[in-house]
């Protein structure tokens, strides 16, 4: 580290901190023109039924290829987009694009999951944005599942809740993403009737790696979701052992590299076709 490389100046580590702030500033500048320059694409990751492993949905995940910065991970640029509120126009693009691609590419029994940030939900007309994305694409509301994290309950909780209730009234479903990793409070499970709880891969992978605590947590979440009339999706399932364990624990749906990585819409279409073919062959 620069700090240890002599020179005796104990402020020498600062340039790297500085670079981080500078990098962040540069990413922000690049992010401002990314939408109009068509630098975003959506990739889609299959969500499968835990029992028969058929594809029930695809989760839309943003990919940004910046001319200056190359491929930038959503873990890096989404927080910047949220801080600057750029996530509002970007998120509207995601909604429109994902609804359009789902309507154009996949059979009617396959849904699309879309991640939505708190900043989008507290916009005055979030539900209107959803209505427009659905009507322009022709996607049936029942095929759209909105994913939010526990962070929506940190501030403006009432506004966010109302926006989600309006979406549910349209016929959309709502999933609670990364469950257990935020500032969890079970209180909000009383306040909003989520369709699905997504169990974070931290617990899923922990349970499979002989962590009795993780195992107990996944069991408890599945039991709780069952009693609340909610389904569960296990995130981050990477191998057969994890898939078998999760199935035994009674999760409704599974997502993870074992069943498919996020892929371009065109490849997602082929995955569904292949599954459809296999299914027909089985029943023939
Ligand atoms: P998320 O919504 O929890 O999405 C799941 C993340 O886990 C994705 O990372 C996915 O590629 C990754 N993943 C899936 N299966 C596995 C697995 O088996 N093993 C491992 N190690 N990882 C797996 P990704 O695509 O990098 O996205 C990161 C996060 O960025 C997302 O987490 C979501 O919070 C956010 N994000 C992505 N796209 C959007 C978007 O359009 N809007 C908003 N607001 N956030 C988004
Ligand atoms: Mg998600
Ligand atoms: Mg997640
Ligand atoms: Mg996440």
Image (cartoon, rainbow, N blue to C red):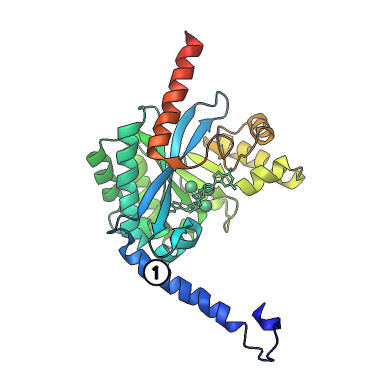
Residue, x 29% and y 58% (percent of image)?
37
* Residue 172 spot, x, y in % from top left: 37, 39
* Residue 94 spot, x, y in % from top left: 35, 49
Residue, x 53% and y 42% (percent of image)?
197
Residue, x 38% and y 61% (percent of image)?
67
| Residue 277 versus residue 73 in the image, above or below | above
Which quadrant of the view contains residue 86? bottom left
* Residue 176 spot, x, y in % from top left: 50, 46
Q: Which residue in the structure is indicated by mark 1?
A: 28
Q: Report if the beta carbon of the residue with label 1 is closer than 8 angstroms to ligand 1.
A: no
As rendered, which of 216 and 71 lies closer to the eye? Answer: 71
Residue, x 48% and y 18% (percent of image)?
278
Q: Is residue 85 visible?
A: no
Q: Is residue 21 visible?
A: yes
| Left or right, 90 with reference to 80 | left
Which quadrant of the view contains residue 182? bottom right
As rendered, which of 277 and 86 lies closer to the eye? Answer: 277
Q: Please rate how many residues cluster around mark 1, counting C-alpha atoms within 10 Å: few if below 14, some from 14 to 19, many from 20.
A: some
* Quarter the N terminus occupies: bottom right
Residue farthest to the bottom, as pictured: 8
* Residue 122 spot, x, y in % from top left: 36, 59
| Left or right, 27 with reference to 13 | left
Residue farthest to the top, as pictured: 284
**Could you say whether the residue bearing mark 1 is in a helix, strand or loop?**
helix
| Residue 283 versus residue 91 in the image, above or below | above
């Amino acid at each position: 580290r620069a700090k240890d490389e002599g020179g005796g100046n104990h402020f020498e580590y600062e340039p790297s901190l500085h670079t981080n702030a500078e990098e962040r500033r540069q990413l922000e500048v690049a992010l401002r023109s990314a939408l109009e320059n068509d630098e975003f694409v959506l990739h889609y990751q299959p969500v499968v039924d835990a029992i028969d492993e058929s594809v029930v949905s695809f989760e839309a995940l943003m990919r940004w290829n910046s001319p200056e910065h190359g491929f930038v991970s959503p873990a890096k640029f989404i927080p910047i987009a949220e801080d600057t509120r750029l996530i509002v126009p970007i998120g509207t693009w995601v909604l429109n694009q994902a609804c359009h691609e789902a309507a154009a590419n996949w059979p009617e029994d396959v849904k699309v999951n879309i991640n939505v940030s708190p900043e989008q939900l507290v916009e005055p007309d979030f539900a209107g944005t959803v209505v427009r994305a659905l009507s322009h694409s022709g996607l049936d509301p029942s095929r759209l599942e909105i994913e939010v994290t526990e962070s929506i309950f940190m501030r403006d909780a009432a506004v966010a809740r109302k926006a989600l209730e309006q979406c549910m009234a349209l016929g959309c479903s709502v999933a609670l993403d990364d469950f257990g990793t935020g500032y969890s409070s079970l209180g909000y499970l009383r306040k909003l009737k989520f369709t699905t709880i997504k169990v974070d891969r931290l617990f899923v992978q922990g349970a499979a790696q002989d962590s009795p605590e993780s195992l107990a947590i996944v069991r408890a979440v599945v039991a709780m979701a069952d009693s609340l009339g909610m389904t569960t999706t296990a995130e981050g399932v990477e191998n057969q052992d994890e898939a078998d364990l999760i199935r035994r624990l009674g999760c409704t749906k599974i997502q993870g590299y074992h069943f498919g990585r996020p892929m371009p819409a065109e490849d997602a279409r082929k995955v569904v076709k292949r599954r459809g073919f296999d299914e027909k062959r089985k029943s023939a």
